[in-house]
Amino acid sequence: MKKSVLLIALAFGVSNVFAQLSTRENDASVEKIGARPKAGDMAFVFGMPISSDSGKAKLFDGNALKSGNVLTYKWYKTDDMVIRFGFRLMNENLTVKGTGLDSSAQYNPNLVTPPFAGVKDVKRKEKKRMYEIVPGVEKHFLASNIFDAYAGADLYLGFGRDMTTSNFDYINGDHSYTTTKTPTTDLGLGLVTGFNVFIAHLPVSLGLEYGWNAKWTFGGIDKVKTDVKAGTLSYTEEYKQDNSTTSESTAKYSKLKRREFNAETNQDVRIVLHIYFGK
């Protein structure tokens, strides 16, 4: 009898549970889609180049977290007006100093004649620097919380300089001093078009950016100064082209100027990832 009562109670309990589940209503919820930035917000910008052509009119590859990439950021001045900014600072220095043994068998390997006496002191310096600044602006056209389209412009300024100094002093009083300087200045203008797609309710968007670029390059000329003393003093100053064909690079000039201009579409095509943040 007790078992029958227990089974009947259990059956009523299970049926009651199923009844509750079958009549239950879910809580109303609204899922927020998109997190469109507003005035005052900022963004970390990461760009992955997808064009295989290096391109002479290319301003910069973007910021794919690789060494030498331009660091890029954005600031929303208003809801639809954005200030773009990128920069790169590179500086390399190498200094070598040494004192040679008192031996006439030691010669400067770069100078075969005249036969200098043994090396007394040697000093070598190598310096490389490159400063790149990329300010820009972009105008957004859509107020959608999912899709975003914009157009803008970038100004590119690049200043580079390589310098190498090789000084040899010899035990007989002769010396060989050589200094090579290669300054380069780049000026570029880029017209940008692009779009973003905001991902869920995350402060993240993924898009594509492309456009037209023009670039001027001034310099890229090796200025070589040589001071050689081998019995009599001899001093020379000459200019040679850098990054040119073999015949041009080996030619020497008393005066030389170099300027290059290139313009092309879609030199900087890249997939762009934005990570937004605000106050």
Image: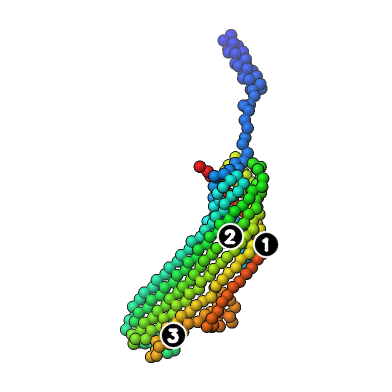
Identify the residue under disc 1.
265
Identify the residue under disc 2.
155
Say left or right for 111 vs 65. left
Tell me which numbered mark, 2 or 1, is placed earlier along the sequence. 2
> What residue is shown at x 64% (from left), y 18% (from top)?
15
> What residue is shown at x 41% (from left), y 81% (from top)?
177
Residue 23 % position (x, y): 66, 21
Q: How is the image coloured?
A: rainbow
Under mark 2, the amino acid is Leu
Distance from the alpha carbon under mark 3 to that under mark 2? 42 Å
Identify the residue under disc 3.
235
Mark 1 residue crowding within 10 angstroms, few (<14) / some (14–19) / many (20+): some
Residue 197 bears which disc, if any? none
Question: Which mark's residue is nearer the viewer, 3 or 2?
Answer: 2
The part of the image, by quadrant, that contains residue 142 is top right
- Mark 3 secondary-structure assignment: strand
Mark 3 residue crowding within 10 angstroms, few (<14) / some (14–19) / many (20+): few
Say left or right for 162 vs 8. left
Given residues 177 and 25, the one toward you in this image is: 177
The part of the image, by quadrant, that contains residue 119 is bottom left
